[in-house]
Image (tube, rainbow, N blue to C red):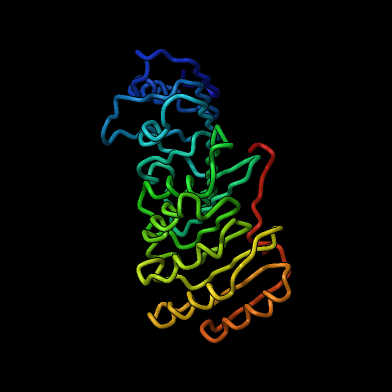
């Protein structure tokens, strides 16, 4: 099978659910560029320490079946490959590529929610097979399954930050010891999330905060922002830059009060920064 480039496996029986034979097959077909698994994800037979390289892979789709984390833990996926499957992350991202100075985009919307990992040489998109059950909190619970302590930049797009009292949100942010920049784009209940940043143990290196509240119906209470900024300043984990994007001119003016605690504050009607736009290519 050394010349095989495309492979689809569907409806594997329970007796064929061990990961070993599938890994053996992948090793025999080093030129695979497209892999599709339909209700055929291995659920047993983890082989500790075994990694199989897929150097030519461009796209992998996993639909249905068990959690994809068992299989992904054994695969070396090249930079730029695209993965579509359930939003269950492998136990370690080291099998995807060397993620040095990377960005995570958590994009939650009805049509196409995704987690995007972007590194210096490319990106990986993770797309859920059942978008209707996906929201910001569930995505963050997936992120919390691995060690995100070295994450430096995070952007949350859409979804409800306080579903189930926001426990998942608080848990994952407490793990982000080196987060420097946080962008919150059109999420619900932002005001109720802000007090989570009052704790000195939550994102102690956070310097930049961008909140886009330009969506209809979303309100930001400046008092929460002021209290959070003052608390962080008193704990010597001071924010250096805050940008508030909204349609409410009163909020724009009120946000400038943050200058008492934050050296650089901006407020505007701009809906997003050009560099923050989520790009798509028609395949996702």
Left or right of 248 in this view: 206: left
Q: In the rendered view, would you say 220 is above or below 44? A: below
The image quadrant of residue 244 is bottom right
Q: Residue at the location (73% across, 74% down)?
A: 249
Q: Residue at the location (53% across, 20% down)?
A: 8
Q: In the rendered view, would you say 65 is above or below 250? A: above
- Number of callouts in the render? 0
Q: Residue at the location (58% across, 47% down)?
A: 108
Of the 4 image quadrants, the one containing the C terminus is top right
Left or right of 135 in this view: 237: left
Q: In the rendered view, would you say 86 is above or below 228? A: above
Query: Closer to the camera, 169 or 62?
Result: 169
Residue reaching furthest bottom? Answer: 260
Image location (x, y in percent) of residue 64: 49, 25
Image location (x, y in percent) of residue 173: 42, 60
Q: In the rendered view, would you say 48 is above or below 236? A: above
Left or right of 267 in this view: 95: left
Left or right of 188 in this view: 12: left
Query: Closer to the camera, 186 or 57?
Result: 186
Image location (x, y in percent) of residue 246: 69, 67
Is residue 82 in view from this perspective? no
Image location (x, y in percent) of residue 177: 37, 64
The image quadrant of residue 54 is top left
Query: Closer to the camera, 192 or 185?
Result: 192
Residue reaching furthest left? Answer: 48
Is residue 284 in view from this perspective? yes
């Amino acid at each position: 099978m050394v010349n095989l480039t495309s492979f689809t496996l569907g409806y594997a029986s329970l007796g064929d659910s061990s990961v070993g034979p599938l890994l053996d097959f992948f090793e025999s077909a080093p030129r695979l560029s497209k892999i599709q698994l339909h209700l055929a994800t291995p659920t047993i037979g983890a082989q500790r320490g075994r990694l199989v390289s897929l150097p030519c892979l461009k796209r992998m789709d996993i639909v249905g079946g068990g959690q994809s984390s068992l299989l992904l833990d054994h695969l070396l996926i090249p930079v730029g490959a695209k993965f579509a499957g359930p939003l269950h992350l492998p136990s370690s991202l080291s099998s995807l590529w060397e993620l040095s100075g990377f960005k995570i985009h958590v994009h939650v919307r009805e049509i196409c929610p995704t987690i995007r990992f972007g590194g210096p040489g490319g990106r990986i998109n993770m797309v859920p097979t059942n978008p209707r059950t996906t929201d910001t909190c569930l995505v963050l619970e997936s992120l919390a399954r691995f060690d995100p302590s070295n994450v430096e930049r995070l952007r949350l797009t859409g979804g409800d930050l306080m579903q189930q009292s926001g426990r998942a949100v608080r848990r994952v942010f407490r793990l982000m010891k080196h987060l420097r920049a946080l962008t919150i784009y059109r999420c619900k209940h932002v005001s109720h999330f802000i007090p989570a940043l009052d704790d000195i143990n939550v994102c102690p290196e956070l310097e930049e905060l961008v909140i886009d509240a330009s969506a209809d119906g979303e309100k930001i209470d400046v008092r929460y922002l002021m209290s959070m900024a003052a608390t962080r300043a008193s704990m010597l984990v001071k924010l250096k830059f805050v940008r508030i994007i909204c349609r409410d001119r009163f909020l724009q003016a009120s946000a400038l009060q943050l200058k008492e605690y934050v050296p650089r504050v901006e407020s505007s009607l701009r809906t997003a920064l050009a560099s923050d736009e989520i790009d798509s290519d028609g395949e996702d």
